[in-house]
Image (cartoon, helix red, strand yellow):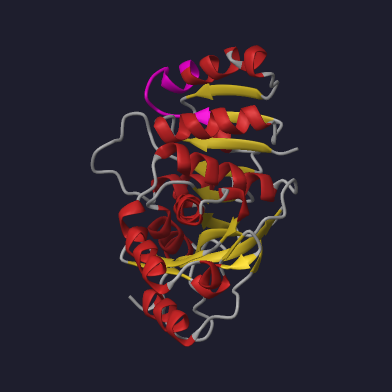
Amino acid sequence: MIDVAILGAGELGGSIAHVLARRELVRRIQLIDPAGQVAAGKALDIMQTGPVERFTTLLAGTTDISRVAGAHLVVIADQARPAQDVDDLLPLTQIAQLASRALVLCAGANGRTLVERGVRELGYRRDRLFGSAPEALASSLRAMVALQTNGSVRDVALTVLGHPPAHAVVNWDDATAGGFRLTDVLDEPALRRLSAQVGPLWPPGPHALAHAAVDAIASLSGISRRSLSCFVAPDDSSGRRTRAVALPVTLGPDGISCIDLPTLSVATRTALDNAMLL
């Protein structure tokens, strides 16, 4: 089991810590926030629910950013009291100095920008810095599909690609519901209505973002083998400058193991290329 440090004890950071502790996926959680005793208070509150919810994950709160040292994974969440006029890259800069071997997961809706800048400006490896917010959007969309098909969200499989909200791409040709292709279950007007709902679903709320982050941690821990939609930094090795976008990935102990891009229709491929070139 791994040790995890969560930077930020705001609503998102606290939710990630609680869900992660409850699922007992990791050995120890450090909740870190510079705002006084907020992190310590939330950590204590979560620990006190352990006997009721029956989990024993160790959790501590602190203001000391140096506690990220030694963590296998650092999650960037939200601060309880956001500081003014502070560069968004500051957490990534601090992690690079204190925990250079750690994987970094950007859990917030702003993770795309952090991933892109972290790789380009700070030299992070693109397989060790990624964002989980697109999976929260995909989960919301699966719920919408389940309502349309009068089925269970557990039976819906789909992937969100691209750059939400305006340039999110859903590969409807690859989506399924109950084992049947979604294009065979729903007619074209229904699919267009679903497509129109993708933008308004962004950004996901803190609880959806927290569960998406924890699903990613489960994959990093080797407990889950699910493919997840994550923000992935661009690959500039071909000489073409592109943007970070959401792609389906498989995660493992060393970060992104592979990108599981399915076969795309011409229209979907074009939409994804346009999102990358924004």
Residue occupying the point 75% across, 49% down: 222
Residue occupying the point 48% across, 67% down: 186
Residue 168 makes an appearance in the image: no
* Extreme residue toward the left, this view: 85
The answer to whether residue 100 is left or right of residue 245 is right
Most foreground residue, 113 or 35: 113
Query: The C terminus lies in which quarter of the figure?
Result: bottom left
Residue 208 makes an appearance in the image: yes
Most foreground residue, 156 or 217: 156
Query: The N terminus lies in which quarter of the figure?
Result: top right
The answer to whether residue 192 is left or right of residue 265 is left
Most foreground residue, 25 or 115: 25
Residue occupying the point 69% across, 35% down: 26
Place of residue 57 in the rendered image (x, y in percent of width and height, measured from the top left):
68, 25
Instruction: Establish if 107 lies above or below 268.
Output: above
Instruction: Establish if 191 lies above or below 222.
Output: below
Place of residue 252 in the rendered image (x, y in percent of width and height, measured from the top left):
71, 55
Q: In which quarter of the image is residue 195?
A: bottom left
Instruction: Establish if 172 lies above or below 208.
Output: below
Q: Where are the magenta residues, as a range?
A: 31-41
Q: Quadrant of residue 270?
A: bottom left
Residue occupying the point 62% across, 37% down: 4
226 in the magenta segment: no
Give the number of callouts: 0
Place of residue 19 in the rendered image (x, y in percent of width and height, measured from the top left):
57, 32
Place of residue 235 in the rendered image (x, y in percent of width and height, measured from the top left):
52, 75
The answer to whether residue 117 is left or right of residue 146 is left
